Amino acid sequence: MSNTTHNATSSRPSAVSRRRFLKSTAAAGAGLTILRSGVLSGQDAPSNKLNVALIGVGGRGRAHYGAVRGENVVALCDVDERAFAAAAKEFPGAKQYVDWRKCLEQKDIDAVVCCTTDHTHAFISNWAINRGMHVFCEKPLANSVEEARVVRANYLKNKDKVATQVGMQRRASPNFDRVREAVLDGAVGTLKSVHVWGDRRHGQTAYLPAAGDPPSYLHYDLWIGPSPWHPYNPGYFGGCLKWNMYWDFGSWQVGDMGSHTMDLAWNVIDAGVPTSAEAHGDPVNPDVAPSALTMTFEHPANDWRPAIKVTWYQGAHKPESLLGVPTKPGHGALFEGDKACLVADFGSFELFPRDQAAGMAHYAPRPEAERIPPMGNFQGQWVNACKGDLKTSSNFDYSGTMIEQLLLGLVAFRAGARIEYDGAAGRVTNHDAANALLSRKYRDGWTLDG
Ligand SMILES: NC(=O)c1ccc[n+]([C@@H]2O[C@H](COP(=O)([O-])OP(=O)(O)OC[C@H]3O[C@@H](n4cnc5c(N)ncnc54)[C@H](O)[C@@H]3O)[C@@H](O)[C@H]2O)c1
């Protein structure tokens, strides 16, 4: 499989002017208009379709086919050539690449959907933004604190030009906003702390041993990409739970379900990066992220709540109950206030009053007419944003700050110390050695912000 390079003809509008056209036509035409000639104009007109590149077309990539089926998918990229057959059936006109850097050279791309391994997410997102492309990146957005900061800064510089979204699609469940409304409307009283958990475990203790040569359909060197070299083993393949516990490829459940479940809290607490982090769990292992883990972050007060602590519990540390209240199985969050605790999973929540006699008399749910409006389809929100106002619920500022917090917890875990954090400078202020853990080492030839 060779990379094909697109030759843009000189008569084509430049990629950037085309994107500007898409945006202005979408903004000007509200919805769809059928002209007398029968030609469609407005957001769904052929001229108003996005040219999309899908990077990582197998596995999770397949979940995005439907979202972009109505657009022009012009490029497919995967390191595993077997993934092209199904994708090419869906998108027969698209050029095929095995190296995402070559793919992003294709000049007519407006928007990128990235579904690769976690250790390439920030790279692909930065490179795409730097080329003026909109980005939907699967979670987690980054694999180090530095990556989270670089991609977030890059987005903020370009937020008037590109729409970004991280694949935290559970956020589209109306329950996320019902939880926000309940906490902001005083259901728990004054918010004191937030606790978030996930019960997945892994049993790996080391990178896998060498197991022969990679098969010919797999571009293993490109799969390793910017990470330090590890010999091929087929055990790394078959979905994210095969590779995301190894530090060079992911951050285990911190980035995986953490991206979804911490979002239950993040959507409520209106927080920035924390001022401190501490963590404990399995013994620190140079190869794999911990299975059992507890991380606690301090967040300063904001205009509606006091300073709070946010705690993440993972694997064997997932509590059965907290503060005398049962947690939900699997994944969930508890908001502790002085009047009640609210316990939520992705689809529902329950309230537990502190004072049984008083019950929940202090709280009345807001009328339906004042509820936060539903966001609709999560991927659809991003597609529309690319053509319109660029606004999404999980843009790289919101989700970049959230993953920076979570990955900072792993820095505290590896440092074995409570760390204090200057979020403006992106520096640990009380532990010099921890600063080295904020970033990852890359192989020669790979640039995070290229
Ligand atoms: N939002 C969600 O609910 C959700 C669900 C599952 C997975 N994910 C995320 O999606 C990502 C992929 O997970 P997966 O389980 O599909 O993994 P996977 O290992 O199956 O990889 C998906 C596809 O990407 C390809 N790929 C890997 N590295 C690549 C690279 N550098 N360039 C091009 N293609 C590459 C693989 O060959 C495969 O076809 C992960 O980051 C994971 O966290 C999100």
Image: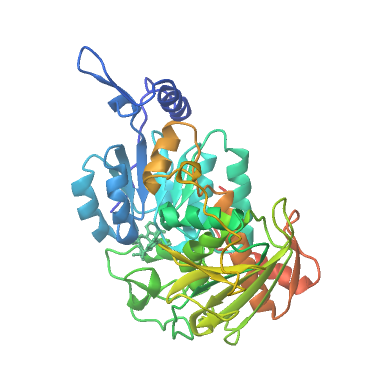
User: Looking at the picture, how far across and down is residue 305, in whole percent?
Assistant: 70, 57
What colour scheme governs how the chains and residues are painted in the rendered image of this protein? rainbow
**Residue 319 visible, this angle:** no
User: Looking at the picture, how far across and down is residue 165, in whole percent?
Assistant: 47, 48
In the rendered view, tell whether residue 341 sits above or below residue 320: above
Indicate which quadrant contains ligand 1. Answer: bottom left
Q: Nearer the viewer, residue 383 or 241?
A: 383
**Residue 338 visible, this angle:** yes
User: Looking at the picture, how far across and down is residue 134, in whole percent?
Assistant: 46, 40
Residue shown at the point (45%, 27%) measured from the top left: 23
In the rendered view, tell whether residue 71 sits above or below residue 196: above
Q: Nearer the viewer, residue 278 or 19?
A: 278
Q: Nearer the viewer, residue 350 or 441?
A: 350
Residue shown at the point (24%, 51%) measured from the top left: 87
Q: Nearer the viewer, residue 188 or 405?
A: 188
Give the farthest residue toward the front.
Answer: 357
Give the farthest residue toward the right.
Answer: 430
Residue shown at the point (49%, 81%) measured from the top left: 315
Q: Where on the picture, by quarter, is residue 269?
A: bottom right
Give the quadrant of the N terminus.
bottom left
Number of numbered tags placed on the structure image: 0
Question: In the image, is 305 to the left or to the right of 160?
Answer: right
Residue shown at the point (41%, 55%) measured from the top left: 173
Q: Where on the picture, by quarter, is residue 184?
A: bottom right
User: Looking at the picture, how far across and down is residue 125, in whole percent?
Assistant: 50, 49
